[in-house]
């Protein structure tokens, strides 16, 4: 029996539905999702396995023009994922960009598309929120430009046209033995996903610059045969003034954060946990190469 297996990078501007798409295709919530842009910071691998194929999705940060070093690292994650992939799924939010010209005229987008010689599929997301006539127009326009092998209208939230997406991926995926066992959903550790869940709740609960200025580190993760697992997590902030915002009046905000994060972590792990949260300040960590490297943002070029 012939087996197809390969890596598929999911790329696009911030907040177009990349993480929602990967989670929906795999059937598990691996990438965190919020209504704020730039939630995803690192390349996240999700694996879809059947008897005949294995598609390894690479969820990536949104393409942007970097302002500080962390954003440069995020963009490097996109470029690395595209370079390592067998196929690219490029997503446009046609509700926010009905003509697609805003997205496909972005210099960084064009640079990534033009520098990659591998096959690309264009996915028009959120068509359930869009004008059908506009969708048909953009399909015709970008099919004729031959920038992409196929143009596929989808809705990641209602899982519309997913069969076409999978079939089209398999058209371009190479014959290759599976890279991972069938029961694996990702190559990332539980510690990583726990830190991401806590960071998701920070994005949901806090406003303005605070979520973007925080990082979550798991200092301890003790699995116990009896009793609850113990997790100690540290929330890194960039300024002293942000620490009391995270903690809140008499600790009210961090208690609420801890409750929501613990419930989500328990749901993900399928068992009860005891979660401790602390806050530390690391001035300008988003622009500090040493700190970024220690937080897992180093690249193969360093």
Image (tube, rainbow, N blue to C red):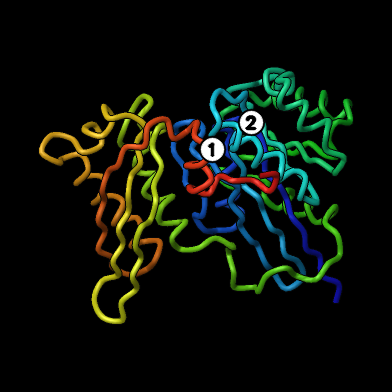
Of residue 91 and residue 76, the one placed in the foreground of this image is: 76
Where is the N terminus found, in terms of image quarters?
Answer: bottom right
The spot of residue 241 in percent (x, y) is 26, 27
Could you say which quadrant of the image residue 175 lies in?
A: bottom right
Could you say which quadrant of the image residue 130 lies in?
A: top right
Query: Mark 1 highlights which residue?
Result: 289
Q: Residue at x 67, y 26 (%)?
A: 132
Q: Residue furthest bottom?
A: 225
**In the image, 293: left or right of 238?**
right
Q: Residue 112, relative to residue 133: is it above or below? A: below
Residue 63: image tag: 2
**In the image, 177: left or right of 258?**
right
Where is the C terminus found, in terms of image quarters?
Answer: top right
The spot of residue 91 in percent (x, y) is 67, 35
Of residue 129 and residue 288, the one placed in the foreground of this image is: 288
Of residue 233 and residue 301, the one placed in the foreground of this image is: 301
């Amino acid at each position: 029996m012939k087996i197809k297996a390969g890596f598929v990078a999911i790329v696009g501007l911030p907040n177009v539905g990349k993480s929602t798409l990967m989670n929906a295709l795999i059937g598990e919530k691996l990438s965190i999702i919020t209504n704020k842009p730039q939630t995803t910071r690192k390349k996240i691998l999700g694996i879809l396995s059947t008897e005949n194929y294995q598609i390894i999705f690479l969820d990536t940060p949104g393409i942007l023009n970097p302002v500080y070093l962390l954003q440069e690292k995020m963009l490097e994650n996109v470029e690395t994922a595209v370079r390592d992939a067998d196929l690219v799924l490029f997503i446009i939010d046609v509700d926010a960009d009905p003509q697609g010209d805003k997205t496909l005229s972005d210099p960084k987008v064009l640079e990534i598309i033009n520098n990659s010689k591998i096959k690309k599929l264009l996915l028009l997301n959120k068509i359930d929120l869009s004008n059908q006539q506009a969708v048909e127009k953009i399909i015709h326009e970008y099919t004729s430009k031959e920038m992409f092998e196929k143009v596929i209208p989808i809705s990641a939230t209602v899982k519309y046209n997913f069969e076409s997406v999978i079939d089209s991926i398999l058209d371009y995926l190479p014959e290759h033995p599976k890279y991972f066992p069938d029961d694996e959903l990702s190559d990332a550790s539980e510690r990583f996903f726990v830190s991401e869940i806590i960071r998701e709740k920070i994005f949901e609960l806090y406003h303005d610059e605070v979520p973007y200025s925080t990082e979550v580190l798991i200092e301890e993760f003790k699995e116990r045969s009896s009793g609850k697992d113990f997790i100690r997590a540290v929330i890194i902030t960039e300024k002293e003034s942000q620490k009391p915002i995270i903690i809140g009046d008499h600790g009210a905000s961090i208690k609420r954060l801890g409750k929501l994060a613990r419930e989500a972590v328990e749901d993900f792990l399928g068992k009860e946990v005891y979660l401790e949260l602390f806050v530390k300040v690391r001035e300008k960590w988003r622009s500090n190469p040493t700190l970024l490297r220690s937080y897992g943002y180093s690249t193969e070029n360093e």
